[in-house]
Structure formats: C-alpha cells, structure tokens
Amino acid sequence: MRTRVGIIGAGPAGLTLAHLLRLRGIDSVVLEARSREYVERRVRAGVLEHPTVELLREAGVAGRLDREGMPHHGLSLRFDGTDHRIALADLTGRSITVYGQQEVVKDLIAARLDAGEPIVFEVSDVRPHDAETDQPYITYVDADGAPQRLDCDVIAGCDGSHGVSHAAVPSTTHAHDYPFAWLGVLAKAPPSHSELIYTHHERGFALHSMRTPEITRLYLQVPPEERIEYWPDDRIWDELGLRLAADGFTLTTGPIMEKGITTMRSVVTEPMRYGRLFLAGDAAHIVPPTGAKGMNLAIHDVWVLAEALARYFGEGRSDLLDEYSDTCLRRVWRAQHFSWWMTSMLHQAPGADDFQRRLQLSQLRYTATSTAAATSLAENYVGLPYR
Ligand code: RFL
Ligand code: PHB
C-alpha cells in the first residue's frame, strides 16, 4: 500500500489531520490499534477552546457540535465556600464549548468513512521505519493477523503518550510530575450548576463539569498511587459533597456510569520531529488536565502540520515543515505554563505549609477580583488566537 501521509492513531490529532489533508486534496491512511467502538466510547476531555470550534466549523465537521455542544460564557473559581465567576465572554469576547472528546472523534470518523477514506482499525505491532530517509514506511499487522507495509512520503505520529511514535524520535524530553492524580466520574445526573466549577478546598481540589443536560462529569484530587477500589460510589459522593459545599449549592447525585483515576504529568518533546516523522498531540506533549488544553493542543498541532504539508506537496516548499516544531512548541509551552499555574493554584500539595497555602489563597483572590488577572486566566482558557 502507498499513501502520501501515513497517520498512526485515530484520536483527535490523527482524525483531524486526516480530515484537513483530505480538504487539501492530500491522501492519507489512518492506522488505529483499537476498534472503532472502543475509540468512540473512550471518555476523556470535554472543553473545546474557541479556536478549536472555529477550526472544526471551517472544516465542515461541526454540525452536531453546533446543535448539541454547550457554549459556556464563564466559569467559577470556588474557594472559601464561595463562587467567584470568571466572565470569559465579557473579558475576552470569546467562549468555550462543552462537547465530549469522543463526540468529536465520532463526528470525524463518520466524515472520513462517508467520504470513502480509509481508517484501518485493530492493527498491531505498528512500527515506523526509515524516518531519516526520504522513503519512510510503516509496518503493522492487520486485524486478520496478516503483516502489512505502508509506504508514504511522511509519517504523522498521532498515537498518544503510550504509542510507538514518541519512542521512535530521539528528541529531548522535558518532564514534570505532580504529586496528585484525578479521580474522574461520569454520572447520570443533571449538572448541579450551569457552568464549570474549579474548587480549591482544604480536603483537595474538586471540579464540577458536564457532558449533556443529563450527564455530569466530576473530578476529585486524590494521591497519585490511589486505587479506584478504595472509592465506592457513596464515598465519591460524600467527598464531592464536602469539597463542593457552598451557600445555595446542592449537588445533584445519580448513578455513576464510569469512574477512573488519571495521573498528572507535564511532558514536552523537543523537537517534535525526526526526519519525516512528525509528532502531534499527546505523542509530543502532555499537560495536566486542569487547564483543559490537551485535546485543543492536539488539534492546533495538526492544523499547523496540514498547512505545512499542503505547501510541501502543492509547491514543493518545505519551509513550513521546517518551522512545524517551533510553531507548535510556542503554543505548547504557553499551555504548559497555564496548566501548571492552574494546577498549582487549585490543588493541595502534600506537605504544603501554611505559607504556601496563604500564597495560593492570595493568588485565587487576586485572580477573582482583578480584571487584569481574570482576563489573563480567561484569554488562556478560551484559547489564544492561532495566528
Ligand atoms: P489520543 O486521544 O490518545 O489518541 C491516540 C490514538 O492512538 C491510538 N494508538 C495507536 N494506534 C496505532 N498504533 C499504536 N501503536 C497506537 N498506540 C496508540 C490510540 O488507541 C488512540 O486512539 O491522542 P491525541 O489524538 O493526541 O489527543 C489527545 C487528547 O486525547 C488528550 O490530550 C486529552 O484527552 C486530554 N484531556 C483534556 N484535553 C482537553 O483539551 N480538554 C479537557 O477538558 C481534557 N480533559 C483530558 C481531560 C485527558 C484526561 N485523561 C483521561 C488523560 C481529562 C482527562 C481525565
Ligand atoms: C471535563 O469536562 O472532562 C474537563 C473539564 C475541564 C477540565 C478538565 C476536564 O479542566
């Protein structure tokens, strides 16, 4: 098999890249380790930045997003048992949209299959080869167990943080571990509030988010080595009730449909390229979820890559490809700092002393009461402009 761009991974990065390339007349093949059902059900991110929504609209894949996505014009910082609203739209003229990552994935898979373009699901033993030459190729084993070879001009490594692409790139990795994890639950219960609530509490961080008017998404800060078996549903609701308590607020409960624990890391790979292998999304960088930036960065990367590949295949010029890594990394480091800042301001670090807690509260009060500080949070949260 031969294609121009061999894409490893059918997450938001790989699928969006395949779609943007098709719009530019560039063929690609997407190789995915899991089944279609699995990737369409995987519960992850929920917040789309303004520029992400704009891009999906321009790319013609936002029909359902526009009907079912929930535009949010603000969010709450909750501390000392009180809400402090950050008016995102008033401060920046822009909003975010709450729409599940797996819904974006479903829409992109449908668009690609409707156009008759290939996604090869359930492949194994995927390996990129000869990235440092001008004839790279990928080998893999298909769902029937048959070995295959895909020759291409360029390989896009969009296979996330546990994929094979990251390991194939001899770049420098900058990493930072955080001393906590998030326990996330999806509950069949209407949201308790119309907006997201980021809560600083002495028992630990908590987040109230949502997926639909019937489904709430909630998170609790837990120790990094925590096990989900220690958290029966009753304990989760009790802890959420304690941390999210505020005047006039009632936590709506309901059956928990899913729960899991995610550790928190910051990772940046520099450069995001090795010869003709380009990394995008979580394969190149990971941010802690507090800033809601992971999926948005993945989509920005592939927007930059699609433009660069269009120039390369259309005009034979590699200047944008040569700038790809630097262009992406400027946004990645900004998001990395923002996510680290939100994380440090809101979580209880083990062993933190009274001095550190008072600094945190001072930062929270300043962010909630200064228009300049609130605007800084808001412009990062809704997403800085692409250009
Ligand atoms: P993905 O989504 O991990 O997709 C990679 C795909 O590659 C496949 N794969 C392989 N395929 C072939 N061969 C191999 N060897 C392969 N190895 C892996 C995988 O099966 C998968 O289909 O990476 P991508 O596309 O870069 O997208 C990144 C986002 O998924 C990630 O950044 C976000 O989910 C992070 N994130 C959030 N991001 C936001 O923008 N807003 C949020 O509100 C937000 N909340 C979150 C999050 C991530 C979370 N978890 C679970 C890590 C909340 C949580 C709890
Ligand atoms: C989510 O809804 O899953 C979500 C929202 C905001 C975050 C992280 C996750 O910062």
Image (tube, rainbow, N blue to C red):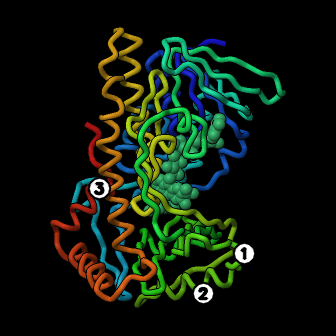
Task: Specify the amino acid type for callout 1.
Answer: Glu
Q: Is residue 367 left or right of residue 210?
A: left
Residue 55 visible here: yes
Residue of label 2:
238
| Vertical arrangement, residue 200 with respect to residue 292, above or below | below
Q: In this view, does 348 lie to the left or right of 369?
A: right
Q: How crowded is mark 1: few (under 14 residues within 10 Å), some or many (20 or more)?
A: few
Q: Gap between marks 1 and 2, in whole Å? A: 16 Å
Judging from the image, what secondary structure is the residue with disc 2 in?
A: helix
Residue of label 3:
380
Q: In which quarter of the image is residue 130?
A: top right
Q: Nearer the viewer, residue 39 or 9?
A: 9
Task: Specify the amino acid type for callout 3.
Answer: Asn
Give the residue displayed 36% in from the left and 54% down from the top. Answer: 336
Give the residue displayed 42% in from the left and 77% down from the top. Answer: 349
Give the residue displayed 52% in from the left and 65% down from the top. Answer: 210
Judging from the image, what secondary structure is the residue with disc 3 in?
A: helix
Give the residue displayed 45% in from the left and 80% down from the top. Answer: 350
Task: Specify the amino acid type for callout 2.
Answer: Asp
**Horizontal and vertical percent for residue 294?**
45, 50
| Vertical arrangement, residue 287 with respect to residue 232, above or below | above
- Precedes in sequence: disc 1 or disc 2: 1
Q: Is residue 255 left or right of residue 99?
A: right
Residue of label 1:
229
Q: Quadrant of the N terminus?
A: top right
